[in-house]
Amino acid sequence: MIDREFIDKCKNIFGHENVLTEKAELIAYSYDATPGIPRETPGVVVFPENTKQIQELIFLARQTKTPIYPRGAGTSLSGGPVPLSKGVVISFQKMNKILEVDPDNLTATVQPGVVVAELNTAVSKFGLLYPPDPGSMATATVGGTVAENAGGLRGLKYGVTKHYIMGMEVVMPTGEVFRFGGKTVKNVTAYDFTHLFVGSEGTLGIVTEIICKLIPAPKYRKAMIAFFDRLEDAGKTVTDIVRNHVIPATLEIMDKVTIQTVENFAKVGLPTDAEALLLIEVDGMGKDSVEWEAEKCVEIIKQNNGKYKIAETDSERDSLWQARRAALPALAQVKPATILEDATVPRTKLVDMLIGVQNIAQKYGLMIGTFGHAGDGNLHPTLLVDPMNSEEMAKVHKAVDEIFETALSLGGTLSGEHGIGVAKLKYLKNEIGRSGIDTMRRIKQALDPDNILNPGKLVPMED
Amino acid sequence: MTVSAKTVFDDLETLKKELIRCMKCGNCMSVCPIYNVEKKESSVARGKIALGEAILSENIKIDDETLVKLIFNCLVCKSCMLACPSGVRFDRIILGLRSAIVKKKGIPFVKKALFGLLRNSELFDKGMKAFAAMQGLFLSAEEEKKRKPRGFLRGISSRFDEKFILPELSRESFRDRSKEKEEVSLPQATALFFTGCSVNYLYPEVGDDLIYVLKENNVTIITPKKQNCCGMPVMVHGDIETAREIAKKNIDIFEKTEAQYIVTVCGSCGSALKHEYPIILENTEYEERAKKWAQKVYDISVFLLKVIKFKEPKGKLNLKVTYHDSCHLKKSMKVFNEPRQLLKMIPGLTLVEMKKPDACCGSGGSYHLTYANTSLKIAKEKAEDIKATQANVVCTGCPACMMEIFESLNRFGGNCHVTHTVSLLAKSYKNERAGNV
């Protein structure tokens, strides 16, 4: 319970200036970027500046059985930081120091509040790159992206957050500080805790320090855009590129609804009769290999009846990317709100998934624009909705259910990169089954016996 | 006759359709100068939108004292609107909310609520009046030479401390000394000069320079003595009714002239005339007239380069100059190329870009007084960025920015001269006439 005594203790731990208690301030912590999920106002918001303060808060929360909700920038898309049972929100905005960049071990050690884009600015001085690039990277924190195991546009070639975390410091729900992993490429000591905590959505421990893996930034890149009259041709282009052993850094797809909406909104010269568009970018350290990969892609596009444009200069590259960047803003103009999903299927099922979504849109008379990361089968069917129209919203909920059903029936997954949180909790059993749910509960109970860490997310504690 | 008005400024319910567009994606957080300093959700647009939603769902009262302070904790710099993927019209939202607060509780309540942030209410009232008029009331005669704030001001805001320095004041306002009409032989255009209060009272020399530049370009200039404040200061405080009255009066004055264009030298004035008048006068009998005049409003840099045949400056200025983008000039009027183009045309002048030229200077009208702590941190970053360029001159297109940058450079130690784009241009023309080419 959060009472005056609890708040006073918080002020002792964090200092007056780092505790928010006014209702108007607290309301601004009742949401993240997830549409259509419940909101709740926390009892108090605290801004830690060091690990010890978090440890003290855990002790206080355990004594009083108060739920704790860690929060990075709150750009998450499954409800991770929403304080469902009131309680304490820990905002990491003031634990935002880059502690070290080690160009010889290719690591960066950071506090959880560091913004992903700022980490990249810092390491770019050494010619290095931290590859995970979620759409929100200009705002999202490393801590938040670790908790959600965020992906991004470069997933196909470079992987996602979990591939770039080498170790961390965690305050356990029982109050102990636990450090594991480190700067070594090889480390098989103990369980692989890094992979347990990445993507744990703040339910197993509070991450207070992170060792990130860096790679040399690619020196050359080449972008192209291709249009297809048939979805099947676009889908085959995607699989053919990979079958020919070219792994593009970016391999994005946009369907007809998205193309038309983008063209309508941004007038970038897209053919509105095309069924699909692919944005392809290859990159690498050698000019010749990048050229070879680009040529190979062009060859495959032609074989599959595609028309293409290739960027020769940086400004041409920018104009090709403009179409992709405009996808969400353009779709958002059509209706008052958008619901962005991230059901993901194996690459070879991409076309089946796109057609499945189109059928669902038709069945319910909804407008759904689909774009996304074709290379890794991670699609973003975007439902354009009017939240004030309850009849339409009822259809939207049914359509979303069917999108997930379709993805699972194609051997896919509920979420490629947004996480389960509260938004997809009810679908979880459909993918991992009874045994999966039981295993998750046992892990949660073992580490967080009082269920104080981000309760109500990721792990369904009741049937 | 007033048409029954139902805009976001009159009816909070109409805000719903603006609020609903916000996806809470958080893109605004990467560009908000206040969030950058304070790191609180309530600092940034989406947090304030959540507060708007809470007001409409009656989860919080509109006169909640903290809420009022949070809603006024915005520079209205519009940076968030450029970063917003769903095109949320946050300017309407923030001004609509402020207007609703003022409607419910009145201006004195707002001042009193903001007073919590200041030290002395009675003096704050004086200060607000003084500031709203942007008058040269800030200095006492004997203190004027030292350019220190008057005693009574020191009690108003923590910003008026011993380090504070105001710009040098002129005893005579610009419109006192300027002619109602400056004729040229064979004019290529007739332009109305909307001076704005800062130029009129604080920087009359910028007005002189504008006249000089326009005359060099064979433009007849009309400077109506009776023109009013643009209304921006009262509008951002939520007093939409007064802003509407001012806007209407100004439009009446414009219509009495034979001006083909209106020229501004202040990002905020230009943005008020061009973008805010048509919004606040929506659903009134002035709506169409406001729209008509809005199309004729140009920042001086655009007027020179895009509207008339421009006489290239030939006089040499051996200066290293850095350019600061005024928020309203860049983010509202979308003017950022033309001033740079003009500067690059001046022989001898080198333009060096600072790290983030379009980061807010921290002024925000009276924001730098009411939210002095946050404003100072924003101002400090700007001063450091300017100093890092090692330029001898920092130039901008807005006198409010000039005032703020002058003050912060002084405070944080920079010996860079602050000036207006039009003043550098005038100087170049003058050097040309003096044979220094």
Image: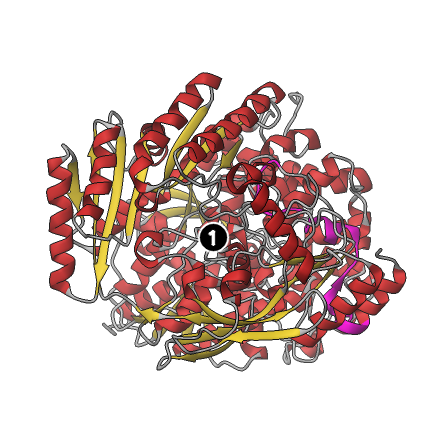
x, y percentage for residue B112? 82, 54
Q: Residues within 10 Å of mark 1 (few under 14, many from 20)?
A: many
Question: For residue B21, what is the image quadrant?
Answer: top right
Q: Secondary structure at mark 1?
A: loop
Would you place residue A415 above or below residue A25 in this image? above
Instruction: Look at mark 1 in the image and give the residue it sits on.
Output: A136
Residue B271 on the magenta segment? no
Query: In this rendering, does residue A452 appear at all?
Result: yes
The image quarter containing residue A171 is bottom right
Q: Is residue A25 magenta?
A: yes
Report x, y in % for residue B196.
Answer: 55, 52
Residue for point 24% across, 72% down: B435
Front residue of B227 and B84: B84
Which region of the structure is painted magenta?
Answer: A12-36
The residue lying at 63 percent from left, 79 percent from top is B145
Observer-nearest of A254 and A264: A254
> Which amino acid, by three-letter code, is at mark 1?
Ser
One can see residue A80 in this view: no
